[in-house]
Image (spheres, helix red, strand yellow):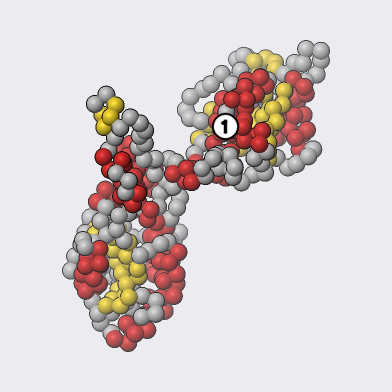
């Protein structure tokens, strides 16, 4: 992957490359970083790159030198041009991953009041902001972008598994980390971490990631898959009817795609259970299915009903997702009858608000469509 940094202060960026992990990756050939001095594309003996803003307000980088620099980059490739700017979209992990898929990124470092808007309109593909604050120039945001994007590339980070454990990569924040000594100023490392039980350590770290995210950044929970952070299984219980029998292959495929532990099928009809036996574990009643989950998990499941009609006290999916992560219990989603709002089971711990299609009519989505949307919201990976 290639990066081209267009800047009026090339020494600033080159110092970063000479001392950082990213610089070492560039030296090894894992990536390529070209630092372009904007003054090389300016006119006149003084290499003028800025001028006064029309209407007053300070100095501004001129459009022509910037345009020439980008055109020079385009001579050898079709680059994606990014301009770090307070007016841009706020950078997040999904955007970083998208940028990591580009072959060549050109990063434009603004200065003073920024850059001439005509250059932005003509050449820039994406404006990116690090947050709601202003810096003296675009070099620091450019270096942040290079660092965030490059560490996703093979060969840049020594242990590539570490990238997947980072905050936001799987949606949740990272777990707490500790090093020697085991006791520092009266504060011990959690005993479990020095015990050598890697299975228990993995479970502890996943739980710590959940608790830290819920406490510090509950807003990001909606983007995370629950599956890697659950201590127990996730089940889907289908209350059989004619529509669902016809869609059973699609329902089964949705469960498999999203990592559901087991698809369960409840029907009083022996014929219905026999026809579903190849795709689901069958039961004559939903109550028996729930008892089976409890026996298998050694803990009663938290039962969530999905209805096509609004039920008093029904929860929004994002609120329920946070509650489920807090409780850390076995989970059973129950896909209720096609018609009506009653879920024919002895109890539901929570009921979801209806999932509606673009028309607003819940009937516009098939049972397989409803289930796929449900599973993506809870188990989809961002």
Q: Please say if 254 is above or below 94.
A: below
Determine the secondary structure under disc 1.
helix
Task: Work out whether residue 186 or residue 14 is closer to the camera in this orientation and state it.
Answer: 186
Residue depicted at x 39% and y 44%: 172
Task: Pick the quarter of the image with the N terminus.
Answer: top right
Which residue is rendered at x = 21% and y = 67% of the image? 295
Residue for point 76% across, 38% down:
74
Q: Is residue 215 above or below residue 61?
A: below
Query: Residue 367 in the image: x percent, y percent?
Result: 39, 69
Does the image show residue 380? yes
Circle 1 residues within 10 Å: few <14, some 14–19, many ≥20:
some
Residue most extreme to the left: 346
Q: Mark 1 points at which residue?
A: 21
Q: Which residue is farthest bottom? A: 271
Tally the marks: 1
Residue plotted at (35% across, 68% down): 262
Question: On the rendered structure, is 291 left or right of 109?
Answer: left
Answer left or right for 312 relative to 98. left
Q: Where is residue 253 in the image (x, y as percent from the top left)?
A: 45, 69
Q: Quadrant of residue 181?
A: top left
């Amino acid at each position: 992957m290639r990066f081209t940094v267009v800047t009026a202060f090339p020494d600033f960026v080159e110092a970063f490359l000479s001392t950082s992990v990213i610089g070492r990756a560039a030296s090894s050939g894992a990536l390529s970083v070209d630092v372009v001095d904007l003054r090389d594309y300016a006119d006149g003996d003084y290499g003028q790159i800025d001028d006064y803003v029309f209407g007053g307000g300070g100095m501004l980088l001129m459009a022509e030198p910037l345009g020439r620099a980008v055109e020079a980059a385009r001579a050898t490739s079709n680059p994606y041009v990014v301009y770090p700017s307070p007016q841009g979209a706020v950078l997040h992990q999904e955007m970083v991953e998208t940028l990591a898929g580009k072959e060549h990124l050109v990063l434009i470092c603004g200065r003073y009041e920024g850059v001439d808007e005509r250059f932005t309109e003509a050449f820039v593909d994406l404006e990116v902001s690090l947050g709601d604050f202003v810096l003296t120039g675009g070099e620091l945001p450019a270096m942040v972008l290079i660092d965030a994007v490059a560490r996703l590339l093979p060969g840049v980070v020594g242990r590539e598994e570490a990238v997947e454990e980072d905050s936001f990569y799987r949606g949740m924040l990272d777990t707490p980390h500790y090093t020697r000594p085991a006791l520092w100023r009266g504060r011990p490392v959690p005993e479990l971490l020095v015990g050598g039980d890697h299975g228990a350590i993995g479970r502890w770290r996943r739980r710590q990631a959940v608790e830290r995210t819920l406490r510090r950044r509950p807003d990001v929970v909606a983007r995370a898959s629950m599956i890697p952070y659950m201590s127990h299984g996730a089940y889907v219980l289908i209350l059989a009817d004619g529509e669902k029998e016809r869609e059973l292959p699609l329902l089964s495929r949705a469960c498999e795609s999203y990592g559901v532990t087991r698809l369960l099928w409840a029907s009083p009809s022996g014929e219905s259970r026999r026809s579903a036996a190849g795709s689901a574990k069958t039961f004559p009643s939903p109550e028996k299915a729930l008892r089976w989950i409890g026996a298998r998990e050694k803990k009663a499941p938290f039962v969530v009903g999905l209805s096509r009609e609004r039920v008093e006290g029904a929860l929004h999916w994002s609120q329920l997702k946070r509650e489920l992560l807090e409780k850390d219990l076995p989970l059973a989603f129950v896909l209720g009858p096609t018609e009506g709002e009653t879920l024919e089971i002895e109890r539901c711990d929570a009921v979801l608000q209806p999932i509606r299609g673009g028309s607003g009519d819940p009937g516009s989505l098939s049972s397989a469509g409803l289930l796929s949307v449900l599973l993506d919201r809870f188990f989809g990976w961002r």
